[in-house]
Amino acid sequence: MKIGSPTARLEAWLPLLLAEWRERNRRGSGQGADGSAQDPLSGRELAGLSEALLRLQRGLTGERLLLEAEPGSRAYMDSPELLGAYLLYYWAVSFIEASLSLDRIQRPALRVLDLGAGPGSASAAFWARGARDFVLVDRSEEALSLAGNLFAAQGASEGGAARVTRLRADLSRGLPPLEGRFDAIVASKLINELWKDEADRVESRAGLVEAAAGQLSPGGFVLVIEPATLSASRDALALRDALCARGWHIAGPCTHSGACPALAAGPARSCHAEAAWAPGPPMAELALGAGLDRSSVKWSWFACLPPGSREPFHGKTEAGTMAAGDSFSGRVVSDGMLNKAGRLRYAVCAKGGEPEGNREPAGKLVTLSARPGSPEALDAGFASLRRHDLLTVEGAEQREGGLGLVATTKISVARAPAAHAAGVDP
């Protein structure tokens, strides 16, 4: 099935998003729409949305004032102005992130449970992969109504239909009654908002994931997507490790299901994905109007299978165990860094070497370096490595603080799936 790049998939939703926002804005303000779904934003629309986007961006980062003290609240979804900014900007960002994550794990799902669904951006990413049965759970009735309209319009435009069940619920108080089994459960930008100020938040979040996983069909998976901020990313890694300790298997992006080495590396260390992105209208116009730098998307994520699943899967991303000597396989988890000696370095997350009882060994961070202009670096394309590329390295040289490429080193690179055709290049 040809599904195109994430940005190409997004293009199919943009007219629906704009039409839905204009209709809701017209009803709410009593003012006529400035154009049809195909028309660009007017100056009046752009000014209002850009101001709302800036408030939304500030409220969801920094002191996060839009995240109310009550756990699980997403009241900003009920504000017409903020919802419009979310719909025409952050909806697209979340769609791209979910699409890239699904591209990397390559796992089919026909029936999806979306926790903290909002206006349905994460579920929309499953649409291109054939999903047509969705259960959307969120506190905001307005956001759920909007998601239902979007899916109905998308189905009509394609000559088909989706089954969409909308459940209003406060997930900090538990799951609502659910019927049937699901091939996938997705929680996009939700987990970090639940129990955020509580000491036992990781345990509470793991409990929610495990409770939802009771509804998974055989082979079903859970996809967690979180912001790339230090606190949210580290909390996501802590949730990942808590699930691994309970026997869960990591599907991606990690190449192992052992403890994450980034957490043990210190409070300033984290792990996130990044993809260059040059958005088109209306996202680019809104970013410019709000004074935001939007040249990439950054997100933290992991996909996992519950205990007792038939097999842990890494698909084509399976990597070998970290060896005691100079050979290993792993995933690049940093940008390139130049040290004082002029060597280009990358941090690579690899499997550990020895099991810990019945548990998979903890991962290990390996520093791999080379002189950028050396023949071995040029032959390996070392300077062009990017986050989430997979490496297999043989015959590296032991150096102080890591491993280095030498003339006899053999290195192979498997690029993370890209969506470069329409402007997204992980």
Image (cartoon, rainbow, N blue to C red):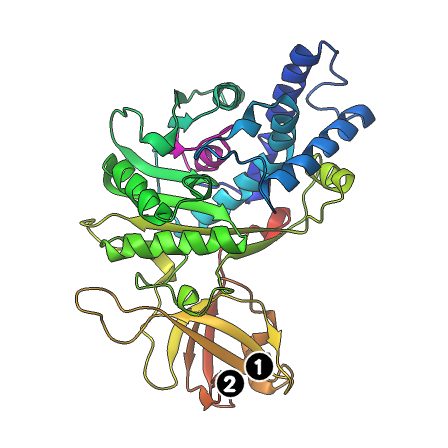
- Near mark 2 (Cα within 10 A), the count class, few <14, some 14-19 or many ≥20, is many
Tell me if residue 2 comes above or below residue 346 in the rendering: above
Q: Answer left or right for 160 relative to 274.
A: left
Q: CA distance from mark 1 to mark 2?
A: 7 Å
- Near mark 1 (Cα within 10 A), the count class, few <14, some 14-19 or many ≥20, is many
Residue 104 visible (yes or no): no
Estimate the x, y position of residue 241 in percent, counting from the top left.
33, 57
Give the labeled residue for mark 1.
377
Estimate the x, y position of residue 299 in percent, counting from the top left.
52, 50
The quarter of the displayed image where residue 378 is located: bottom right
Label 2 sits on a secondary structure element that is: loop
Image quadrant for the N terminus? top left
Residue 404 visible (yes or no): yes
What's under tag 1, amino acid-wise?
Ala
Q: Answer left or right for 339 relative to 151.
A: right
35 in the magenta segment? no
Tell me if residue 64 comes above or below residue 18 in the rendering: below
Give the labeled residue for mark 2.
405
What's under tag 2, amino acid-wise?
Leu
